[in-house]
Image: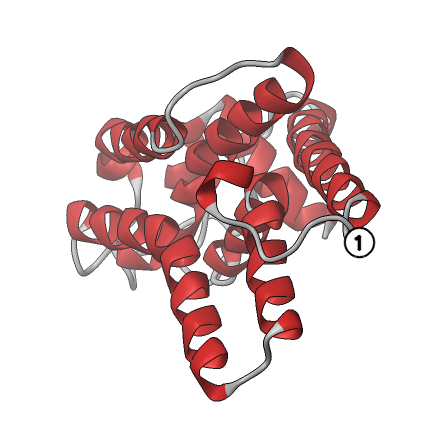
Amino acid sequence: MRRTLHRWGAFLLRPRATAAALSPREGIFDGLWLGLAYIVGSQLVPLGQIVKTFMVTASSSRLLSAAGGLGRMLLAPIIVILLVELLLGRDKAYRRGIYLLPFVLVTTAANLLRQYGGATFDDMAPIFIGGAASLALVFFTRAQVPAEGEGAATEPPSLGSSQAALLASALSLGAVLASGGHDARLYFDRWDRWGPLGPSDE
């Protein structure tokens, strides 16, 4: 876990140097972990809606509906990953997962602004902005990503100390957990009063 946090923090602080230094063997599960972070940071209420709708009216049709809702929820990060992979090219596509970092941070930050700042904006705006940030980072760093099979260091580049990278990751992870914790507490507090929710109830 420490190695993963170091890698993510280094990529946030020095993306080009980190992209050049990482081995193709490193971070192969970054996409999975960051996908989970996206759900925790900004999608727990939609996920709770899917779960409660199925629990309240369990049936085969509701199961299909729940599966469809889950698919729609995950569609945005999947599209971002596919676009990142396309821009990186086949020989560099192994590095696609880490490029979800900006997407996760933007969508989490937007959710925190809704929760604590009362901000109102279109639900799709953070997704488009986060996706654009991830794709911009690809353009900024893809020349430094080694092609699969090329030699590269196995450690993130030195930042003078790993503390800066770990701090950046810790702050990012803390924001995800704070956002998810708020949504989970809100949802369970209102569990008895909320039925299966529609878009107007979010």
Whether residue 202 is visible here, answered yes or no, is no
**Residue 172, above or below 92:** above
Q: Residue at x 17, y 45 (%)?
A: 87
State the residue in front, 102 or 152: 102
**Residue 121, above or below 107:** above
Which colour assignment does the render follow? secondary structure
State the residue in front, 154 or 6: 6
Residue 68 image point, x, y percent? 38, 68
Residue 60 image point, x, y percent? 47, 87
State the residue in front, 32 or 107: 107
Q: Residue at x 65, y 71 (%)?
A: 56
In screen coordinates, is 75 left or right of 34? left
Query: What's the amino acid at mark 1?
Result: Asp
Counting the numbered discs, the total is: 1
Residue 17 image point, x, y percent? 42, 30
Whether residue 152 is visible here, answered yes or no, is yes
**Residue 57, above or below 42:** below
In screen coordinates, is 90 left or right of 96? left
Q: Residue 202 occupies which quadrant of the picture?
A: top right
Q: Residue at x 49, y 79 (%)?
A: 63
Q: Give SS at disc 1.
A: loop
Q: Residue furthest bottom?
A: 60
What residue is shown with label 1? 192
In screen coordinates, is 78 left or right of 172? left
State the residue in front, 7 or 53: 53
> Mark 1 Cα within 10 Å, few/some/many (few <14, many 20+)?
few
